[in-house]
Image (spheres, rainbow, N blue to C red):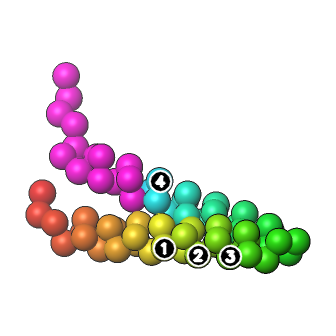
Amino acid sequence: MSAAKPHAALEKWIWILIYGGLFMIIIGIATGRTEEAIGWSLAVPGGVLTAVGVVLIYVRSRHKD
């Protein structure tokens, strides 16, 4: 058996947050063309999720293995 990377779960969550957030932003922009309030309510949390993912990349880079 090979040893799993100690930060594999963190790395998985980083990319889930980034790609999920970007997807929500895109859906929010597309929805905002017809329903502005719903579009904003999707795009803003998507932006927050993306920002959290980017911050976690920084945290991961500063963490010692």
Which residue sits at x=23%, y=50%?
7
Q: Mark 2: which amino acid?
A: Val
Residue 62: x, y in percent?
A: 19, 72
Q: 10 Å neighbourhood of mark 2: few (<14), some, or many (≥20)? A: some
Q: 10 Å neighbourhood of mark 3: few (<14), some, or many (≥20)? A: some
Q: Mark 3: which amino acid?
A: Trp
- The front one of 4 and 43 is 43
Given contact means CB atoms under 8 Å apart, are the residues at marks 1 and 2 in contact? yes
Under tag 3, what secondary structure?
helix
- Name the residue that disc number 2 marks: 44
* Gap in angstroms between the C-alphas marked 3 and 4: 21 Å
Numbered label attached to residue 40: 3
* Gap in angstroms between the C-alphas marked 4 and 1: 13 Å
Which residue sits at x=49%, y=63%?
18
- The front one of 23 and 62 is 23
- Residue closest to the far right: 34
Q: 10 Å neighbourhood of mark 1: few (<14), some, or many (≥20)? A: some
Numbered label attached to residue 48: 1
The span shown in magenta is 1-14
Give the number of the mark in front: 4 or 1.
1
Q: Earlier in the sequence, mark 4 or mark 2?
A: 4
Which residue sits at x=39%, y=59%?
14
Given contact means CB atoms under 8 Å apart, are the residues at marks 3 and 4 in contact? no
Q: Mark 1: which amino acid?
A: Val
Q: Mark 4: which amino acid?
A: Ile
Q: Is residue 60 covered in magenta?
A: no
Given contact means CB atoms under 8 Å apart, are the residues at marks 3 and 2 in contact? yes
Q: Earlier in the sequence, mark 4 or mark 1?
A: 4
Under tag 2, what secondary structure?
helix
Numbered label attached to residue 16: 4
